[in-house]
Structure formats: structure tokens, C-alpha cells
Image (cartoon, rainbow, N blue to C red):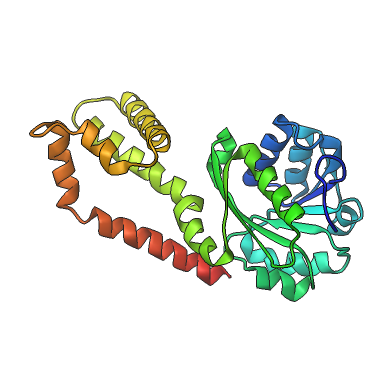
């Protein structure tokens, strides 16, 4: 099947958690798809009911019913139930395009159950909730260019997207998929450090958060020239230089390296 999203897509969503809601919110807000063309199912009927009510989607009472109504699937369940869900899909599968946001689950796994299916793996992240997501997409070799471009355009509705290959997906999972949690922790640690010195936490967390947001924006608007940006804010013999030296003389690089490496390894194990 080849999909023209402007006219032909009927999207079935399996798994109705926060990430699915964030992605679909962008899709609806940008009028990429109309809500009457979207069908949702979750083993937890309260979750599918809440998502359907929020966006006026169609509710399906089973995977079988959903498959009978759609030509494209967004798979958004937990990775550990992937095998059971794919086996269930396989009972009534009729060549729908499969877009999956399941961390760690390899294309080979999908094709072992859904023979010759066109599979697009997607690694999104939670800033999609505020339309600032970072996603990566890769596809099975038999996926048409049109379908791959559809998935890419689909994810652009909640932030930025890169096209990649599957051998990079576990690294991307560690960096941008899990990365928001690590940035949240750093923002919190900086705010706590300032609050220990006399700021109240509410002021400190605002200062830390906005500083992180502004700094990230400067990186993206200055050709990712990190070293020059550090130099621009650092006066020789000044305050920032003292802080830079603390970081340089610590094992922060080793800690970050281990964080990303261990996260990547977990993604590998999920597959």
C-alpha cells in the first residue's frame, strides 16, 4: 500500500498514553489529519476513551475492529507487550503501514510476525507535549519513499525530525529519547545549588529553566558552535571561568558518557 496523507490516510492508534496524545495533538492542531479519520484503541478502555473525547476520535473496541477501519497504524504501546500486540495485529493484518514509537523493538521483530510489512520506527521524546519534540525516523528496506516521507511529515507536527538508519536508533534513544529526564535533573541540580546559597527554589527553578531554554536556542541559532558560545560568555579571570574550571576538573564527562552508554545498552536489550 502507498499512502497519500492528504486524501487517503485512515489512522489507527494502538496505545493511548501521553506520547500518543502529544503526537496526535500536534497532528490535529496543524490540521495534518482530520479527527474523523483517526481511530484509537487501548487495552485500558479509560485511556482510549479519554483520548477519543479529547480530540473527538473514533473508538475501537478491539484491534480487529480498528484494523478493519484503517490503512495506517501508529503503534504506541509499551515495548514489553510488543510481541503480544504484533501477534494480535497479525491475525487481521491487511498490509497497513506500521509506524511504531516502541523503544528498542527492531524492524526484524515486526517482520518476523508481519511478513513483508512496511515498517517505520520512530523515536520521539516528551517535549512533543509542548510542540518542541525531537524525533528520529528509520524504515524497513521495503518501505516506499512516499510512506517514509509521510511518517517524517507526520512527526514534524510536534517538533523537529531527522531521518536515520536503524543501527543509530539505540544511540538516539539514549540521547534524545531519554535525554529530557537528564536535562530535567541538571536543571533541578543547578536550582537546588542556588537555593542552598539563599534563593528560594521557585525563583531558582525559573532562572535555571529559562537559562537552559535560552542556551539551547542559542546553540541552534549559531550553527551548533558550542565552544564559541562558551567563549562568548566567559571573561578571562571572571566568574564563569571559575565555574568552567570546576567542570573541567571534575568527572562530568565520564558521568555523561556512562549515562548515555548505559541507556543505549538498555535499548539494545529491549530489542
- Residue 248 position, x and y percent, is 17, 50
Quadrant (top left, top right, bottom left, bottom right) of the C terminus: bottom right
- Residue 120 position, x and y percent, is 69, 58
91, above or below 256, in the image: below
Q: Is residue 138 left or right of residue 210?
A: right
163, above or below 200, in the image: below
- Residue 137 position, x and y percent, is 61, 54
Q: Is residue 172 left or right of residue 24?
A: left
Task: Identify which residue is drawn at 28% across, 25% down.
Answer: 200
Quadrant (top left, top right, bottom left, bottom right) of the N terminus: bottom right
117, above or below 253, in the image: below
Q: Nearer the viewer, residue 236 or 257?
A: 236
Q: Nearer the viewer, residue 245 or 186?
A: 245
- Residue 235 position, x and y percent, is 14, 31
Q: Is residue 132 left or right of residue 206?
A: right
Q: Residue 128 sits in which quadrant?
A: top right
Count of residue discs: 0
54, above or below 155, in the image: above
Which residue is farthest left? 237
The answer to whether one can see residue 53 in this image is: yes
Q: Is residue 218 left or right of residue 49?
A: left
Task: Identify which residue is drawn at 25% across, 38% down.
Answer: 230
Task: Identify which residue is drawn at 81% across, 53% down.
Answer: 72
Q: Residue 87 sits in which quadrant?
A: bottom right
The answer to whether one can see residue 43 in this image is: no
Which residue is farthest bottom? 112
Amino acid at each position: 500500500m502507498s499512502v497519500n496523507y492528504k486524501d487517503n490516510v485512515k489512522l489507527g492508534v494502538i496505545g493511548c498514553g501521553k506520547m500518543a496524545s502529544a503526537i496526535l495533538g500536534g497532528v490535529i492542531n496543524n490540521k495534518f489529519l482530520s479527527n474523523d479519520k483517526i481511530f484509537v484503541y487501548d487495552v485500558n478502555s479509560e485511556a482510549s476513551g479519554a483520548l477519543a473525547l479529547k480530540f473527538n476520535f473514533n473508538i475501537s473496541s478491539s484491534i480487529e475492529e480498528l484494523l478493519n477501519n484503517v490503512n495506517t497504524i501508529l503503534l504506541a504501546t509499551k515495548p514489553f507487550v510488543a510481541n503480544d500486540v504484533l501477534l494480535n495485529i497479525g491475525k487481521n493484518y491487511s498490509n497497513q503501514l506500521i509506524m511504531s514509537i516502541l523503544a528498542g523493538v527492531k524492524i526484524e521483530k515486526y517482520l518476523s510476525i508481519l511478513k513483508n510489512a512496511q515498517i517505520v520506527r520512530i523515536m520521539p521524546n516528551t517535549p512533543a507535549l509542548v510542540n518542541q519534540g525531537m524525533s528520529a525516523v528509520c524504515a524497513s528496506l521495503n518501505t516506499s519513499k512516499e510512506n517514509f516521507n509521510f511518517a517524517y511529515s507526520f512527526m514534524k507536527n510536534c517538533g523537529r525530525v531527522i531521518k536515520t538508519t536503524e543501527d543509530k536508533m539505540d544511540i538516539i534513544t539514549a540521547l534524545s529519547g531519554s535525554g529530557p529526564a537528564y536535562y530535567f535533573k541538571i536543571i533541578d541540580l543547578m536550582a537546588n545549588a542556588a537555593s542552598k546559597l539563599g534563593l528560594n527554589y521557585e525563583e531558582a527553578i525559573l532562572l535555571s529553566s529559562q537559562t537552559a531554554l535560552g542556551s539551547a536556542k542559542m546553540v541552534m541559532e549559531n550553527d551548533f558552535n558550542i565552544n564559541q558560545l562558551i567563549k562568548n560568555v566567559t571573561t578571562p579571570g571572571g566568574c564563569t571561568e571559575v565555574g568552567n574550571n570546576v567542570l573541567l576538573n571534575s568527572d562530568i564527562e565520564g558521568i555523561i558518557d556512562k549515562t548515555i552508554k548505559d541507556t543505549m545498552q538498555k535499548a539494545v536489550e529491549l530489542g
